[in-house]
Image (cartoon, helix red, strand yellow):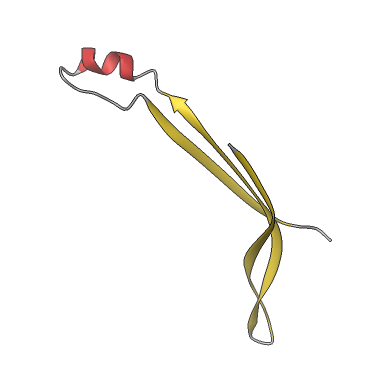
Amino acid sequence: MLTVDRGHILASTVTTGGNPMSVIATNVTISYPYNWQFNRVIGLLVSGASYPASSQITVSSTLANET
């Protein structure tokens, strides 16, 4: 799944008159399932052991919008 949020509000460490500034940014998030190959051999290495066949991997990045 791909999500693009072009109106993401990013809190800035820069202040104006003692108040933190808000920056409009773009946040991109990618989430996908990953099928592990290790699950096939874990039972051979350790008797009775099991491992989840897949995991959800999620990555996200945020960057301030240019004006």
Percent coordinates x, y for residue 3 in the rendering: 63, 44
Question: In the displayed structure, would residue 60 be above or below residue 33?
Answer: below
Question: In the displayed structure, would residue 35 be above or below residue 57?
Answer: above
Quadrant of the frame with the C terminus: bottom right
Quadrant assignment, res 64: bottom right
Q: Nearer the viewer, residue 64 or 53?
A: 53
Quadrant assignment, res 10: bottom right
Quadrant assignment, res 20: bottom right
Percent coordinates x, y for residue 34 in the rendering: 46, 27
Residue at 48 percent of width and 30 percent of height: 33
Residue at 45 percent of width and 35 percent of height: 56
Q: Nearer the viewer, residue 27 or 44?
A: 27
Q: In the figure, is residue 55 to the left or right of 30?
A: left
Percent coordinates x, y for residue 49 in the rendering: 20, 22
Question: In the displayed structure, would residue 42 be above or below residue 22?
Answer: above
Residue at 35 percent of width and 24 percent of height: 53
